[in-house]
Amino acid sequence: MDREIVNNIKSLGIDMIDCANNGHPGIVLGAANIIYTLYAKHMNVNVEDPTWENRDRFVLSAGHGSALLYATLYMAGFDLTVDDLKQFRHIHSKTPGHPEYGVTMGVDMSTGPLGQGIASAVGMALAGKILHEKYRLPKKSKLGKEQSLFDYHVYVLCSDGDLMEGISYEATSLAGSLKLNNLIVLYDSNNVSLDGKTENTFTENVIERFKALNWNTILVNNNTISSIDKAIMEAKESDRPTFIEIKTIIGEGSINENSNKVHGKPLDKDDITRLKLKLKIDPTEFYVNEVAKANFAQQIKERSLKKYELFNKLAKELDYHETEVNLNLNDMSFDSDLLEELRTTNGKIMLEIAKRIPNFIGGSADVGSSTKAVLPNPLNNFIGNNIYFGVREHAMGAILNGLALNGYHSFGSTFLVFSDYLKPAIRMTALMNLPVTYIFTHDSVNIGQDGPSHQPIEQLASLRSIPNMLVFRPADAEEIVGCWEYIINSKKPSCLVLSRNEVSINKLTDRRLIAQGGYIVRKENELYAIIICTGSEVNLGIKIADYLYKQYSLDIRVVSMPCRELFLKQKKEYQEEILPKGIRTIVIEAGSRCGWEGFVYSDKYLLTLDRFGYSGTKQEVLKEMSFDYDCILQKIVKLLKFFP
């Protein structure tokens, strides 16, 4: 029966790819034994309650193998139909080209960009260990030796490509350091990548690499269900994460097996016919052996149901339930003469958030002492809320995604210029719509002597270009509070960009108006022009406007725009109330002009920075780049042309 189920999974996967005329048959034929063994013999899931909190998680890090996953989920009894399989890689289907979180029941995260899956699985496993410690039962229970409400495993199916990507090294290094023994990685080791044999590009001893990373390692030389089953059982007994290398044949059974020809394009019709004959399966397209399907589903149900029922019983006894959390910081106030670095102010606000939000967790890429985004309880033996990620920005982002996929509002911090290291993970945050907050400090060239390699120019524009990502650049303490209230309560992907320099609190800023994205911080009596500013440039804009009024009786409105994305989502009436048509508008921001063009009549009204900086003192760099107070004032005077 095992063989019949596996062959039916292979057959359905190949039919899906053939029907779509697009896909990756190699992994379907080579790794079917792996995924079947995992689901049939080990995965604790409930197809009727696929988001059950204590379910085992499965991450198809080799996301190009989606046909294999969908065929397996269908045969296992998840909410998929043969018609869904026939719609593989078609628009608005339950079976998209790569697995998508929230689209297909049974898919625990979106995967596809190689390395992201295995790295996010580290975050999932870390979440599981934290939950395990947090919800330990007061006495030995029927759960056995795991005396906790939570004891799930995270399984990953990865490919050569996942292990070649640098993020996998970053993430698995941390997993080994943390001894995440609930994490089991199954490596589809077939010696072939898209462009040819891996001997051309990937020759290291992967087992030895993972041993060096403090992982338990197992080599499975024969791709059989019994051997894979034995390896997984052994892995579950380890006190460290386990890496299982399974020697497979890509495209096994195809005339092009063991070559890159079978990696990324459909099999031809004759090959499919011959293959199904070898598999001894009905050649009818999308044939389903109903007896085999029922057997597969029954295996999963018999193993998982008792654990599912016990979890619900114990959860009721412990009064465990997911609560809706709303953040309100209205009782937090600041001295009117506050003069403080925004990164420092933000750190204080985060301490208040941590007191009120139990699932608030995160850390920094070894720069917490500089970003000040540090919570008071370091993670130790999986108790605490502050994670030391080490110098691993990219992995940090993916791990934050894994934590968020398991119920946490996670955050990570580094310098704004290093957001580039995180970009692929940030994109996945936005794609999955996860409550992850990226905190970026050292937000402009005014950091001075660190030089151009550390002075951000294009990063703000880059982050703002990501769909479904909110980028906040607050002006002072009041605006930071408003940003956090919106971020936590909206549960949206977000970036919080902060200055390293001291900023005074402004009596005109208003935390309640952050949700509008932009609002007036200096109101005029007779409107002459408008200055839009963000971050620490808001005080600069107000200072210039006050000078122009005092010196020349010109009344300038100043608009703080902490979140451009939110402002552009407001009704047109509000946007035009803040920025009336026909009024000259100037933008001041210490970053790229990209994205601001629609706010002004011509590019000359964009007082931005569009070239790399210099190594020097803050004052030297700002003057050299014509971005100090005097230079900006002169530019605005010239733009407004109110005297010869």
Image (tube, rainbow, N blue to C red):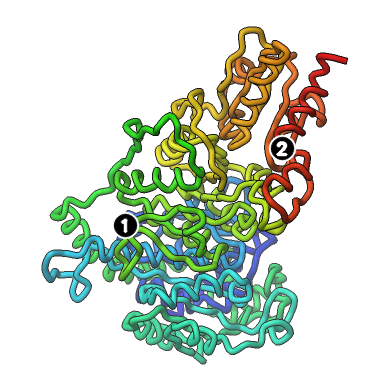
Q: Is residue 8 above or below residue 197?
A: above
Res. 639 image quadrant: top right
**Mark 1 burial class by Cα count in 10 Å: few <14, some 14-19, many 20+:** some
Give coordinates of residue 330: x percent, y percent. 35, 31
Give coordinates of residue 403: x percent, y percent. 42, 58
Q: Is residue 154 left or right of residue 54?
A: right
Q: Is residue 236 left or right of residue 72?
A: left
Residue drawn at the location 33% of the way across and 81% of the way down: 239
Q: Across the whole image, how many numbered discs are drawn on residues?
A: 2
- Outermost residue, top direction? 526
Residue drawn at the location 73% of the way across and 26% of the way down: 586
> Residue 222 bears which disc, if any?
none
The residue beneath circle 1 is 53
Q: Is residue 578 above or below residue 315?
A: above
Res. 206 image quadrant: bottom right
Residue drawn at the location 59% of the way across and 50% of the way down: 442
Which of label 1 and label 2 is nearer to you?
2
Element type where label 1 sits in the image = loop
Q: Judge whether residue 12 can be spotted in this image.
A: no
> Residue 628 bears which disc, if any?
2
Give coordinates of residue 345: x percent, y percent. 45, 43
The N terminus lies in which quarter of the figure? bottom left
Give coordinates of residue 467: x percent, y percent. 61, 43
Comparing 225 with 612, the one in front is 612
